[in-house]
Amino acid sequence: MNPFRFRPTLLCAAIALVSGASHAEENAAPLATQETKLEIVTVVGKPIKDSQQAAFEAKQFADNYVDIISADTIGRFPDQNLADSLGRLPGLAIERDQGQARYINLRGAPFRYTSIAFDGIDVPGAENGRVPRFDSFPSVITSRIEANKAILPSMPGESVAGFINIHTFSPFAQEGFSFSGDIGLGEQQMGDGDIDKFGLRGSWSNDNFGVVLFASENSREQITDNREYDLEHDANGDLVVNELDFRSYKITREDSAHGGTFEYRGEGPLQRAFFSTLYSEFVDKEERNQFVFAFDTPVSGTTASNQAASVNRMLEYGKYENSTFSNTLGADFQVAEWALQARYNTTETENNSLLPIPYSVGGSVVASYDMSDIEDPKLTLDRDLSTISYAQTLGLVYAQKLDIDADKFKLDADRNIELFGQDAVFKTGIQLDQRKADGFVATPAMGLFPGSINIDSYNTGEQWESNTTNTIGGTYYDNKGLRAAWDQAGLTTPQPSAANIVKLEEEILAAYAMTTTQFSWGNLVTGVRVEQTDYSSEGRDVNGNPVSVDDSFTNVLPSAHLNIDLRDDVKLRVSASSGLNRPTYDEWRAAASADITTKEVRGGNPTLEAEEAVGIDTALEWYFAPASIASVGAFYRQIDNVIYADTSTIDGGLYDPSAKGEQWTYIGKVNGKDGEMSGVELNFVGHAADLVPVLDGFGISANMTLLNSEFKGLDGTKYDLPGTSDMIYNVSVFYENFGLSTRLNYQYRDEWISPIESPDEVWGEQKRVDLTVSYELPFDLNGATMSIYFNANNLTDETDLRYAANGTVNQSESYGRRYLMGARISF
């Protein structure tokens, strides 16, 4: 397979189309009289260095410990989304889904310990109200990203690990008309899947009015080669194979976004007024071909012959969807000595999934296996896979849904004051958030699959595309056609029971005050934030009667940040801060299933307490040259009420009024205690020209984070916080000169507990090697600059492993390499 196939005709046409955009102003004249104006220029710009310098200047003069990444840096990495970009910052690690970056573990903490905002307006996570997903937010909207690690009082309290603030583009960033476009075509190596990338952004402004509009669409077709295992060891330590699960996924993932900002700027009391809107959507269309082989009498050893096994088959065509629609109306005023900023925001998020699975059970084979290579299990059958007869086929359908409506009012005010004879800035503000969540957790429905549909007729005979050896002879089915036939025959969607309902209302009223006092040696930021939370959740008791649980609590969150200029280029930071993390809507829901016979309850836990954290951050930063830094940082967090899955005792009266005062067993999310997380962060970015001028253009960026975390369960057992790797590091080597910009990047993270899978499941170490090459064309087209680029991801073709609680591998996945070629234009 030629990795440079890339549908060349389409790509050439795309580049020509983008190039032609720069001639739009000339199209009014007859073609015969048009003259293409080419101005030959010498390209000496260094966008990597320039963007690093801008980011480091913002970091150096910030009032807190923060890492910053600029839009140009994002554009020059081979990143699929903002999660990829953030994963290159110190202390930020990526969790992937089928190889694609989705979540961020900031400092190895659970996903929900990080809040996300657009231009300072924090928004709910579409998945469960708390967890931000970064795979649906494209880079076209982003001018820069701030990863705040030490939290100021003006930032949301729900930022135990950090606060990610995504700055969008301003209409006034460039006077007059400006435009940028990005179009790319590529290929996922395994399966020859098509990759399409498209982004446009245009703006116009004069002295008082400005507008910026953007749109993007990206799609990726991919094969995921998956093997799952149920393994154990016998008393002698020999491997025992209970079950082998062979899967091949065909997925198409699409993300799109559009929106913009309309803005007025004045010189009177009304300094600024604007309206901004953002709609972002992620769609995952998934086809699954799956065969599960369970051995009737498991034996010891890595190899075995002629073993009887039962076979189940699952064929799915389903869809995962989530979207965020956020609108902000804002105004900035100058009233006497006070600068006021008022914001009103509405955000709607939707998260839906529907997974219909024809589930054939009761097949049988005689099989032999060889598990010598755990990443390539070999299973051979005594017959052709397509000839296996199944006792019955069931129609299994999973569905999930959560809609969140959020309203926010935010008012901030600041003014210059004098404090103890020193110049200072006093800032205060209030914020009111009101959220409603409606939906249901993952709910199954099962019945007989329509007998009128012959599943075997949908077998295409096409062999699986895989990195592993397809010893079972797996072939693809026409899952889409099979799903269409099922829809026509009457697909039954799940109707959620009362135990699965999510119905919750939440109101958070926050107020803060802070001062930033300037000294000859730096500054000191002190302040406090107070957040009052009121929430109510609805469910049903065992008799079907409504159950409503509500609560109210207040958190006082003080912080102090000391920033000392040891020299003009050396800064010492010491910060003490506090934060909290509220339970997700799934965890906080009152709905649960109760068994009055066993006195057991499973489901939500509306009595969960919010996690509370206090901690300290220190950092020493040396800005030893333009666009260069050497820094070391350390942090510590103490966390109370850690939320995790376990068994506890509750009052049975919550779910059965007649059982009030009785001790029932609750199985689900509970509060642990004595949580801690700590770490050390090292960061270096340097350019060879600062030391050896003859090596002008070469540079290196490297960072490493060493982490540790733990908490105690109800019985005193110690666990690691989900998401914590012991070590995370990134290394990039780059060169840029004369318009050429290249970067080779290596990412590594040690093993960690999965926050989204079973708490007993551990991800194995993960590494990625990525390459990007871009070249700015050495001529000017009517003021427009153009560049072409080539990106390659996962060059070493990694296989990702996961492990069960007994230490055996329970899953391996591979995806192949990814290539993208495209062009950018801006003027």
Image: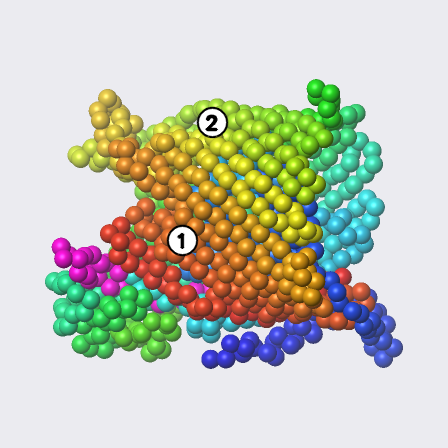
User: Quick one: 428 or 515, which is closer to the camera?
Assistant: 515
Q: Position of residue 384 (x, y in %)?
A: 23, 77
Tell how many labels.
Answer: 2
The residue that label 1 is drawn on is 750
Q: Estimate the spatial distance between the alpha carbons at disc 1 and disc 2, rounded to whole Å.
A: 39 Å
Asked whether residue 448 is drawn in magenta, I would say: no
Q: Locate the C terminus by quadrant.
A: bottom right
Say which element carries label 2.
strand
Q: Position of residue 369 (x, y in %)?
A: 21, 70
Say which element carries label 1.
loop
User: Residue placed at 47% from the left, 59% from the top?
Assistant: 100
User: Residue 449: in sight, yes or no?
Assistant: no
- Sequence-first tag of 1 and 2: 2
User: Residue placed at 50% from the left, 80% from the top?
Assistant: 2
User: Quick one: 525 or 312, which is closer to the camera?
Assistant: 525
Highlighted magenta segment, given as a residue range: 229-255
Q: Nearer the viewer, mark 1 or mark 2?
A: 1
**Magenta residues: mostly which secondary structure?**
strand
Q: Quadrant of residue 611?
A: top left
Apparent side of residue 13 relative to residue 723 in the rendered image (left or right) = right
Q: Quadrant of residue 473?
A: bottom left
The residue that label 2 is drawn on is 534
User: Residue placed at 40% from the left, 53% from the top?
Assistant: 750
Q: Which mark is drawn over residue 6?
A: none
Q: Position of residue 218 (x, y in %)?
A: 56, 62
Q: Position of residue 773 (x, y in %)?
A: 61, 68
Residue 272's place in the image compared with 693, above or below, is: above
Residue 94's place in the image compared with 267, above or below, is: below
The amino acid beneath tag 2 is: Asp
